Image (cartoon, rainbow, N blue to C red):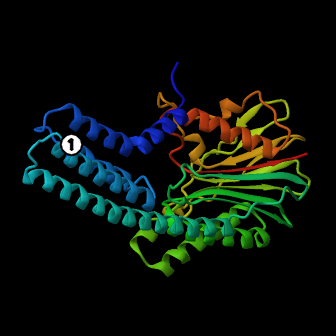
Amino acid sequence: MEQRPDRRNSVARTALRVLPALLLAAGILLDYLTPREFSATPLLTAAPLAAAPLYTRRGTLLTGLAAVLAALAVLVGHAERHIVVAVGAVTELVTVTTVAALAVFINAIVTRGHAQLASAREIAEAAQLAVLPEPEERIGGLDVAARYEAAQAGASIGGDLYAVQDSAYGVRLIVGDVRGKGMGAVAVVAVLIGAFREAAEQEATLDAVARRLERALAREGTRRDTVDTFEEFTTAVLAEIPGDGTLVRVVNRGHPPPLLLLADGTVRALHEGTAALPLGLGELSALPDHVQEACLPPGATLLLHTDGLSEARDAHGVFYDPEARLHGRTFPGPQALLTALAADVRRHAAAVGGLTDDMALLAVRRP
């Protein structure tokens, strides 16, 4: 039976942790079981070097000390067996000692680098959480749930975004994906979320909200005045559920289509009639935004997601199809839906090491 990837990773991590000890044991055995011409120095010097990126400073220091003591024991053992101790043997001891000291220095550099990386990621995550707060569970009479799934621990912060805003025109939603990663993407997310919340309150139509976002990105590009900024764009889908909750309006700007999950388990994608360019590229097209309308019956759930979900692959390179995977299934609420969906897509991509892109999920249900 094939081992699960998480189990294989656990075995690999355990093997790496014991590698320095195995190298020390192998070096001692090599010296004891072979003639003097066979040197154990390469194995003894490799042990502290292997420990440097894996162990703490104390662990690396102890490993280096053990390597030096093993080399010294080899030297003493030769003397006890009346083997002539050549200058080369002393040189080997000095070599092991030097490499052990070097390993401690390397460990200090690696530890400092890890600390700086962790600090940078914590700052980016804090910034991301500041602009992507968890929405309330009930907004405008609708049940709401949102979820942000990072592809991997330690991966760069992505530019996926979501927001929900109650307004005089109904509950308005956005899910988007900014091109790029890191703090630059988080900055663009902040601009878009701020512009969306303001436009959702002030603009009478959903296509007008999209135009406001387009102008906000243009202003940000002019303000930052860099080549990379002018190349940035954001795929996004905007939705609006008026106060009576009987229908949903959608504007799609180059984004995966939202899914409508009915109470009987039926799932259908809300495909737009005409393809639209992402936000930030609107000036390349003179076509107005197409506003699609669909009925929202009681118990129906609207699911918006980024391409981190639909582009997840399995071991055979098959993309995850949320429409097919959710068909025939029912959930007690939006939160249960997102929890099950996140677990399912991770199982789908487990054989290839997990997700390759972050994903944002947003679900609203008409009770």
Q: Nearer the viewer, residue 282 or 194?
A: 194
Residue at screen point 48% across, 60% down:
180
Q: Is residue 319 visible?
A: no
Give the residue type at disc 1. Answer: Ala
Q: Is residue 100 visible?
A: yes
| Left-right relation of 319 to 37 | right
Residue at screen point 90% across, 41% down:
298
> Hey, which quadrant is residue 331 in on the image?
top right
Q: Residue furthest top?
A: 1
Q: Is residue 215 above or below residue 84?
A: below
Quadrant where the C terminus lies? top right
| Left-right relation of 201 to 69 | right
Q: Nearer the viewer, residue 298 or 359?
A: 359
Residue 51 location, x and y as percent? 37, 52
Q: State the residue position of label 1.
A: 40
Residue 341 location, x and y as percent? 69, 39
Q: Is residue 154 above or below residue 43?
A: below
